[in-house]
Amino acid sequence: MKLDFVRFKRLFIRALKLRCPECGDGPIYASLIRVRDHCPVCGLVFQREQGYFIGAIYINIIATESLLFASLILSLLIAPGAGAGLYNVLLILAIVLPVLFFRHSRALWLCIDHFFDPPKGSSEY
């Protein structure tokens, strides 16, 4: 299987904009946290089977843990004696980052799925 980086970039940008991976126009979310059942523009189904967004949880965990680890290493290199203040900031980040990244992790999961398994008749083929 040949990876099409131009197509992947286009899908990634659509995910960052929280737009449909198929058409790029329809919004993925109907409200702050509710994913639409389908795209209002092209009809692509967003809500598949139950448990579909488990991959989004993995994306969110990997992104959060990577940012926390990078922050810890960077802060230890810059200010090795930071102590408890550093751990308090990292604890707050560990709580806030997954919440802030929630919507984008779902959009990224939709786009990754669309990249590797586009629906039949997709214009992305």
Image: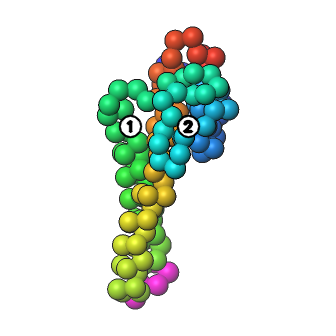
Q: Position of residue 30 (x, y in %)?
A: 54, 40
Report the residue at 51% width, 17% height from top.
119
Q: Where is residue 82 in the image (x, y as percent from the top left)?
A: 41, 86
Q: Where is residue 28 in the image (x, y as percent from the top left)?
A: 55, 37
Q: Nearer the viewer, mark 2 or mark 1?
A: 2
* The one of 75 and 121 positioned closer to us in this rendering: 121
Residue wearing tag 2: 28
Magenta stretch bounds: 77-81
Which mark is drawn over residue 64? none
Q: Which amino acid does label 2 sit on?
A: Ile
Residue wearing tag 1: 53
Report the residue at 61% width, 37% height from top.
27
Q: The residue tagged with tag 1: helix, strand or loop?
A: loop
Closer to the chain start, of discs 2 and 1, is 2
The reply, left or right, for residue 120 in relation to residue 42 is left
- For the residue carrying disc 1, how many other residues have a C-alpha within 10 Å: few (<14), some (14-19), or many (20+)? some
From this viewpoint, is residue 51 visible? Answer: yes
Q: Which quarter of the figure is the C terminus placed in?
A: top right
* The one of 49 and 57 positioned closer to us in this rendering: 49
Report the residue at 40% width, 26% height from top.
48
What secondary structure is the magenta-colored segment mainly? loop
* The one of 72 and 85 positioned closer to us in this rendering: 85
From this viewpoint, is residue 7 visible? Answer: no
Report the residue at 52% width, 12% height from top.
120
Q: Position of residue 69 (x, y in %)?
A: 40, 65
